[in-house]
Amino acid sequence: MGYGIGTRLVEDFLARSCVRRCHSYLEITDIIAQVAFKMYLGITPSVTCNNSSRTAFSLILDKNPLVEFVEELPAGRSSLCYCNLLCGIIRGALEMVHLVADVTFLQDRLKGDSVTEIGITFLKKLDEKKYRRKK
């Protein structure tokens, strides 16, 4: 479900935000954190780089508005990733701008962690020329 939302949301984001073309994965991750999260969720997560090749990053959310009214996970559903929707949205949006990424939850406040952490690992950049429309 999140993936489908992300594929459509990216058009709205690009039209409303007027962001420029990014030249590094760090720049892309900063735009996601500082512009997209602020625009749609009203929060700004912090960004950390997780590897020396600068392809893996973490978005650390001190506050997650999607879990604001959730007290605890239902009994027998402890493996439920309530906010996995965010991972799908990010993955779908990145794919629409020709970036393949693995987006997963690393920590979740609903499961007793101190923060909510989303991991983004950029896998490859799709060939843009292959997907351009012929004029």
Image (cartoon, rainbow, N blue to C red):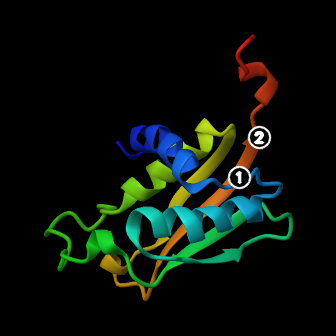
Left or right: residue 127 versus residue 94 is: right
- Asked if residue 8 is positioned above or below residue 23 in the image, the reply reads above
Q: Are marks 1 and 2 in contact (CB under 8 Å)?
A: yes
What residue type is disc 2 on?
Answer: Lys
Quarter in which the C terminus is drawn: top right
User: Which residue appears at 55% of the width and 45% of the height?
Assistant: 15
> Circle 1 is placed at which residue position?
122
Q: Could you tell me which secondary element the residue under label 1 belongs to?
A: strand
Q: Which amino acid does label 1 sit on?
A: Phe
The residue drawn where x is 26% and y is 68% is 78
Examine the rendered structure and indicate whether residue 94 appears above or below residue 57. above
Q: Which residue is drawn at 58% across and 47% down?
A: 14
Q: Name the residue under label 2.
A: 125
Q: Which mark is residue 111?
A: none
Residue 14 can be seen, yes or no: yes
Considering every residue shown, the one lying at the far left of the view is: 75
Give the quadrant of residue 46: bottom right
Quarter of the image with the N terminus in it = top left
Q: Where is residue 20 in the image (x, y as percent from the top left)?
A: 73, 53
**Residue 113 placement, left or right of 52:** left
Is 33 situated above or below 109?
above
